[in-house]
Image (cartoon, rainbow, N blue to C red):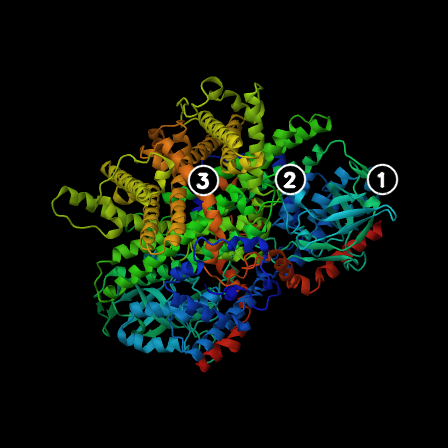
């Protein structure tokens, strides 16, 4: 092992194993996770090619191969628990991208949620056994997040008892669904249902797209791959165009809405339940943000402990770059953020499961808040993580830019999270809608509970409405609880400002929608402040549950750093709201630098605690043993450009260039 | 007004008609777009010349970029070599010389995606560091491509910190040769462009050792590949460093030297030389090594970093008038996404930044040219300021352009993630500029040292009667400063004088705070180096604020020069206002910190800022048209001039190899999987 990393690990103030247990939820979880990981790593069938040297078509092929072997292995190993399937896939797929994933994550769940018992009986067995490989086709070329704008039509013909599917315009072509380009033979298609001459909005239809046996597109179907993307090389995101394509009436998922054989439309009782899948996916994405950021931090911090550069004092050996204040200032707040998001991710998952049980018992009361929270947190954590991965990459200097660092891959595979499953700005505005509603309810005398209960204490409720800027300034910058209060005040203030500006615009504009648009910057700001408060609150509360003293100390320092760094970045909000004074902000900036020094000796142990295998990190710079440079050289030699000593373009162009001129 | 024909994709069926949603944006012209293009080009004659070159380049299918997104790294590199070859052939035919505007425009037309980009960097380094005899010997060989050159500085273990480089050049007086050697694994040269497969010669930066003494970094011309068959020469290990986030078309390479001998004359000796007996002579300053880096950084901002943000803005803004999403009024059709306030807030500050940096880098280039000749004649008085400006502004521009390009990418939703949008390549390319040619943090700190020095000098000169004037860019450090901003209402913040002063105030305060904090630490016993490290976060913030001030000031001065173009002046002033105010709002804490702005004033800034958005909205498309990028150089399905986004996206996707080359994965893995499960059923 590299001497620097050895020293770092020996000097740590805590045992990273204990922290790993905290992150996994329990020692038992850690044990089982490792057991599954080792099953794969010790499996001779598991060969991990370096995808960086392959073309896109080759990467797709490798992914399909892995998917195929994975299906067999999971049966073989008896892995059936959803949590364990996720662990299994993560380690197996490395990038966690697989062409058949939508079969499991979207096709089957949608069938279960929206299909009748008869439909489930008919389809479920074949898609679980992969006779049918399904995908989920919602997004179109011209429309994504705004569902009502989708243009694909499904027109019912009572004579043949069939639906006729059409993509009437270029913009209506289904675009982006994963696994659609090459892999799937069926798709659940979202289309505008038209029966008896009337449009009833979006409904889901099971559409066969490729012939079983030959895998050729069926007549009336145009299907293919949408071409290269920033990342997700392994995934065949596809397009689908349908021309007068007929499917039987029974292919419409009819658990809720129905079309009778004569074409009569029967309305669903409630459509709130369709929220369920979206909320689940978004909650899951918060955990993915934490995971991606933790990986990036692991790579950047280990490499910064190995890399020596420049001089702090003339004549002395070059220091580890992790000893530079600027490097600590770049990385440690991100490390703190990674921990914060880990705890938020766990909270979102627990909350989802808890509320899901309530829903099972018919209690929908908490669903709106969870829906709003999941939307906002997905946006907040993915925006932050997106920028933070880039910051980690840049902190690794030039080598961070090489695929050997693993960081470009983490980044390109993470960045679409900002736009898929609900574009982030739209998500923030959904949260804002909930906040504005809650604000109005408080005004009409109702008490709010949950994360927005702070709106009950708005000073405008007690004093005069204009005095938004007057807050008590009693913030203790060494107490996470006190800082949570400060973030709460900031959120309350920005929510109130947005609400007032919205009211003001409503008075002056012809429509509510126009007023909403003209306030949307304020609304996004309010949602961000709300989400920031929630993160701070959850991190602080997590500290209370930590028993071990050494772990508690190190997590408390990270929590403080997370809180104070945010204050420093958003100092304007805290100053303008009178939440903190100018001299307090100076103290905050000073305290941040002290915390950097305090965290420095534990930095490597803190990333070790994330417990990523080298294979999962996929990074030469982030190797556990720290032997960076030798392996970098070995890695580069495998580059496709080095296959021939003299590249053929020399003979074709360079030599003629030399002689011709 | 010039005909728009040159902007449209040649031979593209979709470009015959313009999408009505973008056409209507061009109907009401509040200013003359062509005139603004001329201003950006530095004169109507330049615009004409540029278009002439573009039409020549675009009519040659071998120079086309259209299949780039579907290529492997190998294919990309080969295509880039081919493009270079064809452009050179054209240049030879038409008599375009090295450094001619024609060649600059030719490279712009192909988005700089050619091989041998470092070849010209070598020439620049040769001209600034080489003696007249050396220039006379090597420059013609380069110009005629008899040799292909690269510039090898960065090593596996060291980048920005030059003194840390380990490659050695030891003078052997007996043979009058230098022995160039990589003593460790980390001394391997790593990252130089064109080194992996193309170059025959490298300008190697190495520690000079003569007569047993180490004399620091010097530049040596080292032959690395045979001019006969291109194989590596004895003692040379060379190859490609492998796949990267972007720059597939460049063969970044590694180079290990095992006691390679080169003649004494191969050390560049304008500013330092080794006599035959091993005596070391150094008439120049040590900093002179920085000169070639200064040139590189200035050119980088002008030719690479700023145009990338401009292109990203063109693509994102054009797409945002075609894309429709949600209704703003219940009765209306879905609105263009550019009519959403949140979209304007994302894109317009980037557009303003793109204009700000255009004028900033163009003036920096001018300053550079005016001081360059003096420096070559050994007048170094302007070098510190030039060095500081090129460092700090490189850092700020690459930071903000990366941020902005990334934002444009995300603002295009899912389609921005497709390579066919052109945005992923732009993001991958611009972001590299944050770490190459000097890591940005290190560069900010170089600027900070310059600021510290000048701040202390300003203090000293205020105390004494001797008034030595400060370099122009820091003159504000001695100017009288207001403690409070005098603005009374939102409209007051639309005065360039007012916001420039505000930025000067914040920059001066942060410089003062960081210097004082440094001194306090030293007075309390810390040594200078420890104290410096403990204040670097503050110094970086001060340097950023100073750079921001410089860019705001430069933008307002550019406006002053446009008095004869009132319509253009007005539209650019809005961008200038937006640029300055957006900066204030993002950093409002710094302005509130010492009470320079009150909370009410920050609210007024926000009001002024929000009111600018709808004004800029009206001109947004015209402002992107004015950059006058051809469709071919944008190479974006989303950003074409005619707005036929979706048709093009669909058509381009068909060309993907995943669609044209069948599906071997089905035969190999999917079919058996499907059949095995069927057998079980």
Q: Nearer the viewer, residue A425 or A619?
A: A425
State the separation of the CA atoms marked 2 and 3.
35 Å
Answer with left or right where residue A188 lies relative to residue B208.
Answer: right
Q: Is residue B79 above or below residue A459?
A: below
Disc on the earlier residue, 1 or 2 = 1
State the separation of the CA atoms marked 1 and 2.
32 Å
Q: Look at mark 1 in the image and give the residue it sits on.
A: A260
Answer with left or right where residue A225 lies relative to residue A304.
Answer: right
Tell which subunit mark 1 falls on. Answer: A
Q: Residue at x 34, y 76 (%)?
A: B138
Q: Look at mark 3 in the image and give the residue it sits on.
A: B610
Question: Mark 1 against mark 3, which lies toward the viewer?
Answer: 3
Categorize mark 2 by other alpha carbons within 10 Å: few (<14), some (14-19), many (20+). Answer: some
In the rendered image, the residue lying farthest to the left is B465
Categorize mark 3 by other alpha carbons within 10 Å: few (<14), some (14-19), many (20+). Answer: many
Residue B566: percent from the left, percent from the top?
Answer: 36, 53
Q: Nearer the viewer, residue A233 or A402?
A: A233
Residue B544: percent from the left, percent from the top?
Answer: 35, 46
Residue B339 appears anywhere in the view: yes
Tell which subunit mark 3 falls on. Answer: B
Q: Nearer the viewer, residue B36 or B393?
A: B36
Categorize mark 1 by other alpha carbons within 10 Å: few (<14), some (14-19), many (20+). Answer: some
In the rendered image, the residue lying farthest to the bottom is A659
Q: Look at mark 2 in the image and give the residue it sits on.
A: A281
Answer with left or right where residue A201 lies relative to residue B418.
Answer: right
Residue A530: percent from the left, percent from the top?
Answer: 52, 31
Callout 1 touching callout 2 (CB < 8 Å): no
| Residue A451 lies in quadrant | top right
Residue A485: percent from the left, percent from the top?
Answer: 46, 25
Secondary structure beneath dot 3 equals helix
């Amino acid at each position: 092992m590299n001497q620097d990393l050895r020293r770092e690990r020996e000097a740590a103030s805590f045992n990273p194993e204990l922290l790993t247990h905290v992150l996994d939820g329990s020692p038992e979880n850690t044990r089982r996770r490792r057991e599954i990981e080792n099953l794969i790593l010790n499996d001779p069938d598991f060969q991990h090619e370096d995808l960086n040297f392959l073309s896109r078509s080759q990467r797709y092929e490798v992914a399909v191969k892995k998917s195929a072997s994975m299906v067999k292995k999971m049966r073989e190993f008896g892995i059936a628990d959803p949590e364990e399937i996720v662990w299994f896939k993560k380690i197996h797929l490395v990038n966690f991208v697989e062409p058949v994933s939508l079969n499991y994550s979207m096709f089957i769940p949608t069938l279960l949620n929206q299909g009748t018992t008869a439909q489930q009986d008919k389809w479920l067995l074949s898609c679980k056994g992969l006779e049918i490989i399904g995908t989920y086709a919602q997004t179109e070329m011209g429309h994504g997040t705004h569902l009502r704008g989708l243009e694909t039509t499904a027109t019912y013909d009572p004579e043949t008892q069939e639906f006729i599917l059409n993509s009437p315009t270029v913009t209506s072509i289904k675009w982006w669904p994963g696994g659609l380009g090459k892999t799937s033979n069926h798709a659940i298609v979202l289309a505008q249902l038209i029966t008896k001459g009337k449009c009833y909005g979006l409904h889901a239809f099971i559409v066969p797209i490729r012939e079983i046996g030959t895998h050729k597109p069926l007549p009336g179907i145009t299907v293919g791959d949408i071409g290269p993307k920033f990342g997700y090389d392994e995934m065949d995101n596809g397009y689908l165009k349908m021309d007068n394509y007929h499917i039987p009436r029974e292919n419409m998922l009819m658990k809720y809405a129905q079309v009778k054989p004569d074409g009569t439309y029967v309305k669903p009782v409630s459509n709130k339940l369709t929220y369920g899948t979206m909320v689940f996916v978004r909650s899951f994405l918060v955990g993915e943000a934490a995971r991606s950021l933790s990986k990036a931090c692991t790579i950047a911090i280990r490499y910064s402990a190995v890399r020596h550069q420049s001089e702090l004092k003339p004549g002395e050996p070059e220091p580890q770059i992790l000893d530079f204040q600027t490097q600590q200032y770049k990385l440690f707040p991100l490390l703190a953020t990674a921990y914060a998001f880990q705890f938020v991710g766990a909270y979102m998952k627990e909350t989802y499961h808890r509320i899901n049980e309530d829903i099972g018992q018919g209690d929908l009361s908490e669903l709106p808040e969870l829906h709003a929270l999941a939307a906002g947190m997905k946006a907040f954590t993915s925006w932050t993580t997106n920028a933070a991965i880039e910051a980690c990459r840049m902190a690794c200097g030039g080598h961070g830019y090489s695929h050997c660092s693993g960081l470009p891959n983490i980044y390109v595979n993470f960045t679409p999270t900002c736009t898929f499953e609900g574009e982030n700005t739209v998500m923030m505005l959904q949260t804002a809608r909930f906040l504005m509603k809650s604000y109005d309810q408080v005004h009409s005398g109702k008490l709010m509970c949950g994360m927005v209960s702070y709106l009950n204490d708005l000073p405008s409720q007690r004093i005069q409405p204009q005095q938004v800027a007057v807050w008590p300034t009693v913030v203790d910058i060494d107490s996470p609880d006190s800082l949570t209060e400060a973030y709460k005040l900031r959120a309350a203030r920005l929510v109130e400002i947005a609400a007032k500006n919205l009211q003001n615009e409503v008075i002056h504009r012809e429509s509510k929608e126009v007023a909403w648009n003209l306030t949307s910057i304020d609304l996004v700001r309010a949602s961000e402040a709300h989400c920031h408060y929630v993160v701070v609150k959850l991190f602080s509360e997590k500290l209370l549950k930590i028993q071990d003293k050494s772990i508690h100390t190190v997590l408390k320092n990270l929590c403080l750093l997370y809180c104070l760094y945010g204050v420093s970045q958003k100092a304007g909000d805290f100053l303008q709201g009178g939440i903190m004074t100018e001299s307090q902000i100076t103290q905050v900036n000073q305290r941040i630098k002290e915390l950097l020094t305090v965290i420095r000796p534990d930095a490597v142990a803190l990333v070790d605690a994330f417990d990523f295998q080298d294979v999962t990190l996929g990074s030469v710079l982030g190797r556990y043993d720290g032997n960076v440079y030798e392996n970098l050289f070995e890695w580069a030699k495998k580059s496709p450009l080095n296959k021939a000593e003299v590249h053929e373009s020399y003979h074709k162009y360079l030599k003629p260039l030399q002689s011709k001129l | 007004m010039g005909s728009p024909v040159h902007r449209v994709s040649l031979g593209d069926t979709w470009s015959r008609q313009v999408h009505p949603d973008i056409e209507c944006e061009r109907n009401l012209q509040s200013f003359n777009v062509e005139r603004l293009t001329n201003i950006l080009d530095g004169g109507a004659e330049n615009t004409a010349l540029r278009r002439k070159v573009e039409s020549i380049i675009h009519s040659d299918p071998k120079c086309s970029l259209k299949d780039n997104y579907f290529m492997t790294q190998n294919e990309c590199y080969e295509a880039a070599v081919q493009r270079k070859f064809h452009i050179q052939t054209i240049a030879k035919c038409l008599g375009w010389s090295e450094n001619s505007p024609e060649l600059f425009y030719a490279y712009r037309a192909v988005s700089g995606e050619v091989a041998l980009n470092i070849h010209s960097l070598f020439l620049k380094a040769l001209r600034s560091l080489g003696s007249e005899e050396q220039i006379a010997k090597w420059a013609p060989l380069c110009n005629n491509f008899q040799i292909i050159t690269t510039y090898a500085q960065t090593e596996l273990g060291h980048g920005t910190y030059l003194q840390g480089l380990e490659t050695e050049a030891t003078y052997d007086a007996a043979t009058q040769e230098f022995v160039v050697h990589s003593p460790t694994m980390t001394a391997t040269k790593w990252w130089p462009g064109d080194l992996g497969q193309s170059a025959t010669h490298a300008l190697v930066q190495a520690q000079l050792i003569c007569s047993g003494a180490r004399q620091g970094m010097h530049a040596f011309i080292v032959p690395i590949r045979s001019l006969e068959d291109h194989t590596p020469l004895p003692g040379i290990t060379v190859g490609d460093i492998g796949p990267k986030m972007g720059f597939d078309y460049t063969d970044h390479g590694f180079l290990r030297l095992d006691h390679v001998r080169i003649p004494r004359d191969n050390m560049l000796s304008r500013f330092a030389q080794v006599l035959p007996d091993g005596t070391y002579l150094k008439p120049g300053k040590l900093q002179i090594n920085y000169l070639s880096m200064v040139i590189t950084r200035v050119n980088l901002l002008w030719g690479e970093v700023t145009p990338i943000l401009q292109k990203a803005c063109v693509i994102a803004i054009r797409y945002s008038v075609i894309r429709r999403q949600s209704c703003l009024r219940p009765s209306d059709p879905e609105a263009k996404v550019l009519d959403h306030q949140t979209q304007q807030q994302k894109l317009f500050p980037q557009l303003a930044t793109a204009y700000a940096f255009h004028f900033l880098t163009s003036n920096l280039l001018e300053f550079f040219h005016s001081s360059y000749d003096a420096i070559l004649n050994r007048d170094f008085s302007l070098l510190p300021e030039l060095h500081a400006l090129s460092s700090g502004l490189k850092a700020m521009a690459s930071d903000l352009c990366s941020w902005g390009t990334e934002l444009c990418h995300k603002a295009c939703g899912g389609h921005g993630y497709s390579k066919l949008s052109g945005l992923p390549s732009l993001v991958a390319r611009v972001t590299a500029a944050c770490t190459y040619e000097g890591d940005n943090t290190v560069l900010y700190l170089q600027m900070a040292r310059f600021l510290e020095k000048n701040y202390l000098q300003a203090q000293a000169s205020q105390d004494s009667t001797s008034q030595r004037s400060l370099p122009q860019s820091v003159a504000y450090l001695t100017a009288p400063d207001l403690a409070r901003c005098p603005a009374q209402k939102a409209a007051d913040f639309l005065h360039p004088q007012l916001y420039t002063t505000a930025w000067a105030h914040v920059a001066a305060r942060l410089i003062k705070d960081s210097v004082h904090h440094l001194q306090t630490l030293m007075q309390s016993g810390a040594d200078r180096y420890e104290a410096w490290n403990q204040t670097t976060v503050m110094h970086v913030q001060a340097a950023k604020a100073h750079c921001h001030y410089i860019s705001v000031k430069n933008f307002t001065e550019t406006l002053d020069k446009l008095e004869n173009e009132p319509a253009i002046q007005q539209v650019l002033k809005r961008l200038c206002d937006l640029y300055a105010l957006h900066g204030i709002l993002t950093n409002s804490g710094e302005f509130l910190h010492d009470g320079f702005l009150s909370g009410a004033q920050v609210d007024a800034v926000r009001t002024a800022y929000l009111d600018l958005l709808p004004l800029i909205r009206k001109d947004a498309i015209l402002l992107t048209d004015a950059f006058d990028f051809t469709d071919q150089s944008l190479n974006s399905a989303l950003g074409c001039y005619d707005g036929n986004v979706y048709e093009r996206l669909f058509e381009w996707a068909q060309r993907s190899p995943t669609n044209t080359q069948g599906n071997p994965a089905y035969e190999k893995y999917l079919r058996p999987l499907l059949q095995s499960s069927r057998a079980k059923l």
